[in-house]
Amino acid sequence: MNTEYLKEQLTNIKVFCDTYSTISEEDKYLHNEISKLVGAVRSKIWNEEYDERNKNRLETKIIDGVKVIIPEFMNGLGEDCKFKYVDNVLYALPIKCSIDKDNSFHEYAYVYSKENENKHTRLIVRLLGGDKFGNRIFTEANYYKKVESYNKYLNKNYGRDDRFPEKFKKQVETVIEEFNKLDGVNDFSPIK
């Protein structure tokens, strides 16, 4: 997207909006709609510029012997995660299971997959257990247009255990398998 062109057009729209008469109700309605357009164009410009800055900041790491670009939406997950690369899919997995005083735990794992050029998915898998509700997971998918985007365009919360789409089955199984390798985790198996 050419942000300079958008900025020029935004200037023209603002000049028109500022000089437009709002005497009648119809004129006020049109003025309000043009104001909404100005806001939408400003937002688009801001998002494009933000993505451009993020594109320059993307990190490339060697993970499991493969050179991988870390998406902007997978950065900043903290010291409690480690990256793993399995079957062209990037995982950010917990490095330990923190058990609370009541022997329960609540950990997060993240999975990045590129579905196509304009659809990048971050699957969030919440791993819970050790309490009266038993072992369970909650899954949620965030969708992004670009690898450098931080703002998602769609969010789907799938709920508990095995309610996620079939396309995520392998990734969820890998997360559970890796989680079971951690110290203090005993046969975590929330999926039937």
Image (spheres, rainbow, N blue to C red):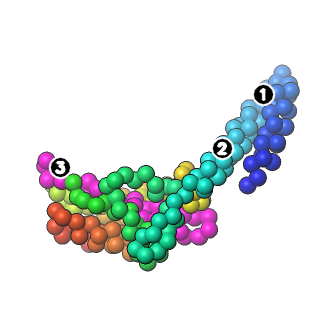
Residue position for label 1: 28
Circle 3 Cα neighbour tier, 10 Å, few/some/many (<14 / 14–19 / ≥20): few
Earlier-in-chain disc, 3 versus 2: 2
Residue at 28% in and 72% down: 177
Asked whether residue 120 is drawn in magenta, I would say yes
Which image quarter holds the N terminus? Answer: bottom right
Badge 3 amino acid:
Asp
Residue position for label 2: 46
Residue position for label 3: 100
Earlier-in-chain disc, 3 versus 1: 1
Residue situated furthest top in the rendering: 23
39 sits to left or right of 113 = right
Badge 2 amino acid:
Trp
Check disc 1 and report its element: helix, strand or loop: helix
Badge 1 amino acid:
Lys
Asked whether residue 187 is drawn in magenta, I would say no
Check disc 3 and report its element: helix, strand or loop: loop
